[in-house]
Image: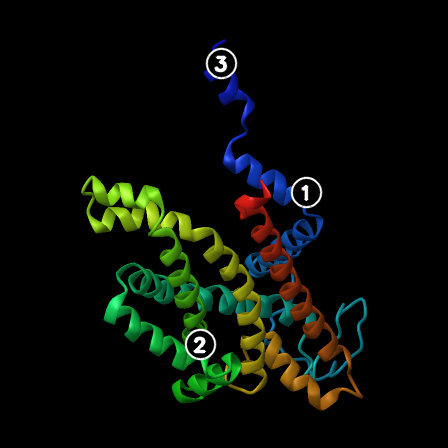
Amino acid sequence: MSVAETTTTALPKPENRVWKKFRSHKSAMLGGILVTFFIAIALLAPVLPIPDPAATDWGAVRQAPSAAHWMGTDEIGRDVLSRMIWGAQASLLAGVISVGIAVAIGVPLGIVAGYFGGWIDAIISRCTEALLAAPFLILAIALAAFLGPSLTNAMIAIGISATPIFIRLTRGQVINIKVEDYVESAHAIGLPTRLILSRYILPNALPPILVQATLTIATAIIAEASLSFLGLGQQPPSPSWGSMLNTAKNFLNQAPWMALYPGISIFLVVLGFNLLGDGLRDALDPREH
């Protein structure tokens, strides 16, 4: 066996190093388990043997947790467990789609601003700073109120509110990457701009964007719950953890379980995404390998 082959065999692949680092991060693995659990629950909701989340039972109004209703019932006799499971769909969907909107808008604008600079960068940066001047949740509430109360409009509002984060992050990454030797070499051999951006700039800017997206999903889930709590998100009778908390606030003394389970679920899924994001940040950091 040659020296080159020995060296190649001895060096682990980059993806193996990333997975090994992530796997050794116990809190990140816990976060991954929590996120996977809630995603599985949301996906399996249509096939799980649970009651209709909108079915009322006036003979079982605000019943405490029991064998018949594991998490109790709400103010009109609906099964809380069933509404929790179906509500996971709304909360996770809002988090993922909102961040998807932010990434789809923010990353291209950040690349354009960071790579081309000049007046294009100035315009994009000033607009970004104007949006960042408003607190994230306040901006989301204002946009959701303007668009109208619905889960779709809430996702659009949260996505637009989160876009400046990705514009600023991507711009900073591109400014650092475009002065690297391999990018300068690509310019020197005459590669077109679109190839430089797609082959060299974007792939090297993706790791921090991926980490930020994971962390922002947690923020978006809290924002969706806040909008639903205010009546600007998922509309009744469709379940959402935020709208369940909005209803439960009126019955805290008589039926505390109505608020307990949605609150715990929001806490756990947000904790899961935050732990997962922290683990990805450590695993994808080249200085850690």
Residue 259 sits in quarter:
bottom right
Q: Which amino acid does label 3 sit on?
A: Val
- Name the side, left or right, on which 191 lies relative to 5: left
| Nearer to me, 205 or 280 | 205
Q: Disc 1 marks which residue? A: 24
Return the residue at label 3: 3
Q: Earlier in the sequence, mark 3 or mark 2?
A: 3
Residues marked 2 and 1 touching at CB (< 8 Å): no
Residue that numbered label 2 is attached to: 161
User: Which residue appears at 61% of the width and 53% of the height?
Assistant: 36
x and y, in percent, of residue 270 in the image: 63, 66
Q: Nearer the viewer, residue 26 or 237?
A: 26
- Front-most of 7 and 106? 7
Q: Disc 3 or disc 2, which is closer to the eye? A: 3
Using the rendered image of the protein, determine whether residue 174 is visible from the camera's viewpoint: yes
| Left or right, 139 with reference to 174 | right
Return the x and y of residue 235 as percentages of the image width and height. Answer: 51, 82
